[in-house]
Amino acid sequence: MTVSDTTPVIVGVGQFVERIDAPDYAGLSFADLSERAAAAAIADAGADISGRIKAVGSVRTFEESGAMQVPFGRAEKMPLAVARRLGLKPDVAILHKVGGQSPLALIADLGDKIARGEVEAALAFGSEAISTVRHLTTKGETRDWAEHDDGEMIDMGMGFEGTLSATSIAHGIRAPVVAYALCENARRAKLGLSRADYALEMGKLFAPFTEVAATNPYSSAAVKPMSAEEIATVGERNRMIADPYPLKMVSRDQVNQAAAVVLMSVKAAREAGVPEDKWVYLHGAALGTEREILDRPEIDAYPAAKAAIDAAFATAGKSADDMAAFDFYSCFPIPVFNAAVRYLGLSPQDPRGLTVTGGLPYFGGAGNNYSMHAFASMTETLREKPGSFGFVGLNGGFQSKYGAAILSTTPREWPGCETKTVQDKLDAVPKAVLAEKPAGAGTVGTYTIVYAKADPVQAIVIGDLDSGGRFIAESRDAATIAAMIESDPLGKKVTVTPDEKRNGFVLG
């Protein structure tokens, strides 16, 4: 198939990891890590392409997203700081929005610029240095990571709008592990499984991920394959974080990882001499944004994932059966259960595997940039199987934003990334009805118990009032929490009492 000269193709990918126990550990900054991955991506193209790169884009670090504070300062304009290190002189520099979906959104934006003929080559990258920040801080060491660049940068904004309501935040839904735990237990309730049986199902889902991570040279730490039972069994080295998640099911954010992707027009790649066996085409892509947790008709479900996946496959003219490889964003089990199992009908033991990296709890949860690693690894996988297709599923927020992308070495005109039709479909579904001042008897539809170290400190429940409407409530009463640990609260009756700031509940 002959494609247009301006068709964007992936021509280079790069990844980098710095482990604190490595002999050559240097404590690199976020910008330094990104530069290493970006340099690897440029070199991977196999031709002199640096002078053609006129657009650069960076995925927000957790520090830039407001998720953590770094005491060492930071680059004020990360895209320009990395470009300067590489000797690039871009006409366009972009800092993208918060969320695990942002690597696809960034790649799509840069690809659109190439397709419109605005630039002939672009570089996308991102990094996290959380492991180094915590390591140096613990040792009492300091660094100076503050940088300033004078060039212009397009800041796409945070993109937090609609992610969490004030009501959710007031009742303790702040950390991702809490939000996902509520979604996860809602799924368990629907399946009618016991705690032990469901824990084993989560372990079976993630055990194959550990095998992939153990062989990945870019994993954030030395990883050994684990059995489903090892992942699921709570113990001294696998303490409970938020019911139903012990530590080994939780995204690992203590990483020093970076990944980058280079896109070029077909014409520019050909002129530069990039070998065509390096070229990977986008065949379909879509992004969708979910409602806030309390507004979702089904708390366990993820309609944005289904809508994005369906749209991407429709654009590509392919199905899950046509894929040679997958990578599903796996910060916790529930987004994988939804995207892979519920919506695509895949088995956790599918011989093709559900990840090409090893997943966020084992390979590493490199913040908003994790799926840039997935794109890099998928590109390498597809190059080894010319003509095959691969799927990358991206997840942001609290099952809040989903992206789907289908890639192949098979030529294809640039399809862009579908958003409007996906979002219109999602927005047309009515919201759940939330009781304004819930009071009286209700039934628990989902819950979580939040732990501090090994101690349970808070219980959160969401359910339906007997009088109508959804409620959320929380308790810090030790006896109530102990009773919920002793006996599964799903489907149990509670009495809800509102006050000015938040709703409380008692069992029975």
Image (cartoon, helix red, strand yellow):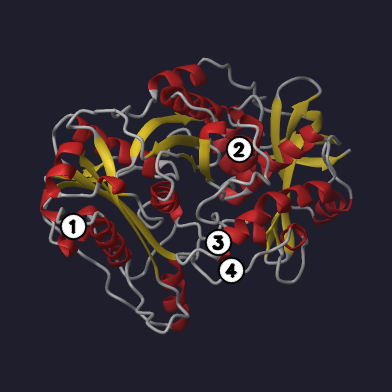
Q: Secondary structure at mark 3?
A: helix
> Disc 4 designates what residue?
223
> Disc 2 designates what residue?
340
Instruction: Pick whichever, 22 or 455, lies toward us.
Output: 22
Q: Earlier in the sequence, mark 3 or mark 4?
A: 3
Q: Residue at x 42, y 78 (%)?
A: 136
Q: Residues within 10 Å of mark 2 (few under 14, many from 20)?
A: many
What type is the residue that disc 4 sits on? Val
What type is the residue that disc 2 sits on? Ala
Q: Earlier in the sequence, mark 2 or mark 3?
A: 3
User: In this rendering, would 365 be left or right of 84?
Assistant: right
User: In this rendering, would 321 be left or right of 118?
Assistant: right
Closer to the eye: label 4 or 1? 4
What type is the residue that disc 3 sits on? Ala
Q: Earlier in the sequence, mark 2 or mark 4?
A: 4
Q: What's the distance in space between the residues labelled 3 and 4, CA to CA?
A: 6 Å
Report x, y in % for residue 323: 51, 37
